[in-house]
Amino acid sequence: MKKLFLCLLISWQFVSTIAQPPATPDKIYGDLFRDVQMGKVFPDGKTFVDCVPKKNPKNIVADYNQQKGTPKFDLKQFVENNFEMPRTPQLNYITREKDVVMHIKNLWGVLRREPDTVVVGSSLLPLPNPYIVPGGRFREVYYWDSYFTMLGLMASGEGEMIENMVKNFAWMIEIYGHIPNGNRTYYLSRSQPPFFALMVDLLANLKNDSTYLTFMPALEKEYEFWMDGAAKLKTGQANRRVVKLNDTLVLNRYWDDYPFPRQEGYKEDVEIAERSGRDKKEMYTHLRAGAESGIDFSSRWFKDKKNLTTIMVTDMVPVDLNSLLYELEVVLAKCKFMAHDAQASADYARKAERRRVAIDKYCWNKTLKYYTDYNFRTRKISGVVTPAGMYPFCVYTKNLDYMSLLARQAAEQVKSKLLQPGGITASPFTTGQQWDAPNGWAPLEWMTIWGLDRCGQRELARDIAERWIKLNVDVFKRTGKMMEKYNVVDLNLEAGGGEYPSQDGFGWTNGVLLALINKYGLPK
């Protein structure tokens, strides 16, 4: 009895400690934070916000305020004296296996993190269960990454880890009201593409349908987060993540509640806002919303399709986001049916159908014959073909014969605009941004392949899969690495662009590759 009481006490202390609104690095360290980030003390802006203080942060701040400006004061040395530097164990990702499947299965142990402990002044949001991180500079769990990682965990027979990760996400929804971008304090103001319902689907397939009832409260609470403010909107208005397009149709957008520079990209955001000549808070909101989209950054979000200074993410109704929320509504309808709540089940089913109608009305580009984003400010549909347009083909549950007809048309756009020797590009444009050509990314390959295969375009799905598998395996044989992203145009060059060097490890690449090898096999 005493042992049980002690366990409950420790658990209560863990939850109560972190349930308090956690302070972000800019609030904790003030001028020290800004001076380090703007002074580019570290090449990567994420380094300092991931540091762990060696003593009470208040004492560090007091020492800084006393010492700065004194002769021979060295800011970098001060940081190194007062903080533990975050580890980036990239060398550990290169192991001796010649077989890529065995390499990835062994990497799960390297990428595994045990339940966290609370550290005062650290930006890490502690999680109660083990989890898998992507690798490299990404030392924490990431929301949408984790679904694709789970595909590989399933192929590796790691069902317990999948369940632990789903439990962690449900726990974060309960504690913070949503799943943050990642388990860092500086990610709390935003989420990422809502793949939680698909994660629950995956776990239910591994276990049984009672999984839906177990996670129904978390699914409902996530839905409330994304739909917050919808009931009060008038036609043409937007609030947080919801947009009312006409009297009956509401769709969603990406958003972030904190209109200031991203803490992990502080200097970059300040400088791009200055260069843009636009309202700075507006720019910061667009940049942060781009981070919530996971597609940070891409010509998909640019007014001129070329320059980050023209970013307009919060003006867009993204087809991928709304497809994922359709899936969430479908899963909630199923949950409520299983819970013998027929009225709530019918309610969610109606919401899903209204969303499907809205996506088709506003995001099906009749000229291109492809799903694209919709700009609700200009009331114009985007003309940019990206893999996001394949999401409806992955999740729609009705009119599959009609969807197969649309998929034949969409396949032509994929072939003409995106298909390259190594797979598909993130967009048709080359801008220097990492989510544009010539780069290909595992999650976008998977969603495109899944959508094509599900809706009858199996030959093209197999072709893309085989190109991607071959590229991944060839790079592994040449370098011993699994990369975050790949150059799918020139197979001898590395992927580039963005705010940091291409990382290796790598969670979602590992997951998608194993799942594709399971379905299509290794290259001959």
Image (cartoon, rainbow, N blue to C red):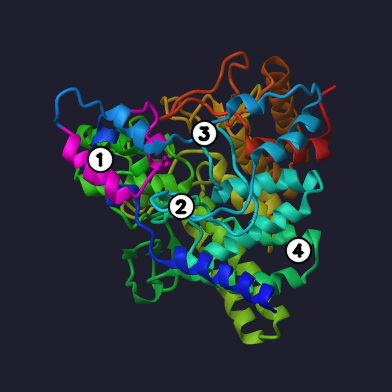
**Dots 2, 1 in contact, CB < 8 A:** no
Secondary structure at numbered mark 4: helix
* Residue for badge 1: 32
What's the mark number on residue 350? none
Q: Mark 4 belongs to which amino acid?
A: Ala
Q: Mark 3 belongs to which amino acid?
A: Arg
What's the mark number on residue 87? 3
> Residue 287's image quarter?
top left
Q: CA distance from mark 3 to mark 4?
A: 35 Å
- Observer-nearest residue: 71 or 172? 71
Is residue 186 placed above or below 467 in the rendered structure?
below
Q: Mark 1 belongs to which amino acid?
A: Leu
Q: CA distance from mark 1 to mark 4?
A: 47 Å
Q: Nearer the viewer, mark 3 or mark 4?
A: 3
Q: Earlier in the sequence, mark 3 or mark 4?
A: 3
* Residue for badge 4: 204
| Image quarter hosting the N terminus | bottom right
**Dots 3, 2 in contact, CB < 8 A:** no
- Is 445 placed left or right of 225 in the picture? right
- Is 197 placed left or right of 52 in the picture? right
Q: Earlier in the sequence, mark 2 or mark 1?
A: 1
- Observer-nearest residue: 415 or 366? 415
Q: Position of residue 437 (x, y in %)?
A: 51, 27
The magenta segment is: 41-68
Q: Earlier in the sequence, mark 1 or mark 4?
A: 1
